[in-house]
Amino acid sequence: MNLARVSLTLAAMIAVFTPSVLCAVKYPETRKSGEVDVLHGVRVEDAYRWLEDDNAAETKAWVEAQNKVTFGWLGEIQQRDAIRKRLTRLWNFERYGVPSKAGSRYFLSKNDGLQNQSVLYTLESLSSEPRVLLDPNKLSKDGTVALAGAKASWDGKLLAYATASAGSDWNEWKVRDTSTGEDLSDHLKWVKFSGASWTRDNRGFFYSRYDEPKPGENLKGVNYYHKLYYHRIGTPQSEDRLVYQRQDQKEWGFSGEVTEDGRYLLIHVSQGTSPKNRVFYQDLQKPDAPVVELLNDFDASYDFISNDGPVFWFLTDLHAPRGRVIAIDIRNPVRSQWKELISMSSETLQRVGVVNEQFVCGYLKDARTVVKVYSLDGRHVRDVDLPGIGTASGFDGERKDSETFYSFTGFTTPGVIYRYDMKTGTSTVFRQPKADFDPELFETRQVFYASKDGTKIPMFITSKKGVKLDGRNPVLLYGYGGFNISLTPSFSVSTMVWLEMGGVYAVPNLRGGGEYGEEWHQAGTRLKKQNVFDDFIAAA
């Protein structure tokens, strides 16, 4: 699908800038080899396999020749410098992340506009001046070290944070004092595919790692045997306690999550990229308590929401491809005793949190966000009044909180941060970026079209107001259709410049994504993958 995006982008640029230049382009010859594979009796030619060796002299020469043609063509675009200047100017605006709260302290990320990475700030109150807690731009002189994750302790006094070097999946975790801004002695290595979940006493956290690779093997091969550990603050990693491992399941991954009441450790078990998972738990109040296999089958996705003592709440797609909320009493966890609190609806339930003793549910309705509030017994309380067609994210917090925060963004709306009062049901702007463009000059429409087999596909179309969709304006058509990923409205500086220049931006929600739940996802996978391409072609 990325190839389709590149092709359409290039075609649109040609139409806008240099309609006659392409005819003069002479591409370098690409050698065809005689490589042939026979798969189940079928001959499959692979004439360009030699290009897979990116260190070969012939491949390097081919790349250099291609780049010479590409940059030579781009260099002839008279508007290129103007576009670069406009991109730089439009990119230069403050951007904020969704605030979180731990103890009495707030945490907020901010980018001043042109920083490579956002800076993490802390606030004593919502009205206080933000103080820099962690600036990842200063983690290395060459900018190759990135902030890969962060989690504050329950009391907000400590911050566990992960860094990654040169784009590696390997993370190193450290701990910072949020009052002084100084790092403690804690240093964890060989961590991958892991967050941090603090125990309620704030003395340590759970994390997942692999064994240290052999010398020279850290960037090669596949990692097996993920393990869940507990790290106690102030102790070396060598003393970390192994909590869970499975020597009989080398491909399983584990992540730990402590319940808000501090009573239980949830162990989420994954396999590959599948959303289906298993869930185990351990009672943290009982010394040497065994790990209990609560959900011991990869039959569905089970996202833990919260708990009310021994009653665990999950968002699941079991018998509900668009999601529902269930309650499982771990004292009697047989499936016949599970209770459904929020039934599946026509909208796709994507996430659920508990704030102010209420469920806050984020749905997708035709690929745009809808948020609803329910009581803990599943009674609908209200819909959250969102600013328009777009994507809302956030709505996190603790059960006792009366406030939560969310970000709202759209194709012509940079992320605005709102504070939502759970008592009154009202939203107020907390942080609003000031980008150098007028959103009132643009409009987003949603249309529905029929694919090859008649399936109705939604598509967002954004352009300047008054632009006629008669085929005369260049169109950037972007789709994905895979891995259960939903394409929802989002702001892009490069897309905005495209729109300012008279372009049209269209985003179809292809099958294979998650816009309409698991059935929509499966309709674009494996033997049904052709549906993805048919949907994209029909959009054009």
Image (spheres, grey):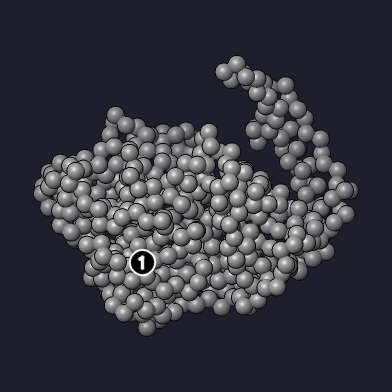
Seen as rendered, the residue at the extreme bottom is 127
Pick out the residue farthest to the left. 286
From this viewpoint, which residue is outermost toward the top? Answer: 41
Near-viewer residue (391 or 88): 391
Q: Is residue 280 left or right of residue 10?
A: left
Instruction: Say left or right for 324 vs 261.
Output: right
Residue occupying the point 68% across, 33% down: 51
Residue found 85% across the figure and 56% down from its top: 19
Q: Nearer the viewer, residue 3 or 247?
A: 3
The spot of residue 521 in percent (x, y) is 47, 45
| Dot 1 alpha-carbon crowd within 10 angstroms: few under 14, some 14 to 19, many 20 or more | some
Asked if residue 127 can be seen in this view, the reply is yes
Q: Which residue is mark 1?
A: 372
Q: Is residue 298 left or right of residue 70?
A: left
Query: With respect to residue 180, does 450 lie above or below?
Result: above
Compared to residue 13, the image places residue 33 above or below, namely above
In the depicted structure, whether residue 383 falls above or below residue 367: below
Amino acid type shown at disc 1 = Lys
At horizontal 17% and vertical 46% (from top left) the residue drawn is 337
What is the x, y in percent for residue 280? 23, 43
Give left or right: position of 105 versus 287: right
Please report the residue visible at 57 percent of the width from the left and 74 percent of the height from the top: 93
Q: Where, by quadrant of the figure, is residue 268 drawn?
A: top left
Is there any visible trace of residue 229 in the rendered image? no
Q: Position of residue 250 (x, y in %)?
A: 35, 32
Report the front residue among 320 and 237: 320
Quarter residue 425 falls in: bottom left
- How many numbered discs? 1
Q: Secondary structure at mark 1?
A: strand
Q: Position of residue 305 (x, y in %)?
A: 28, 56
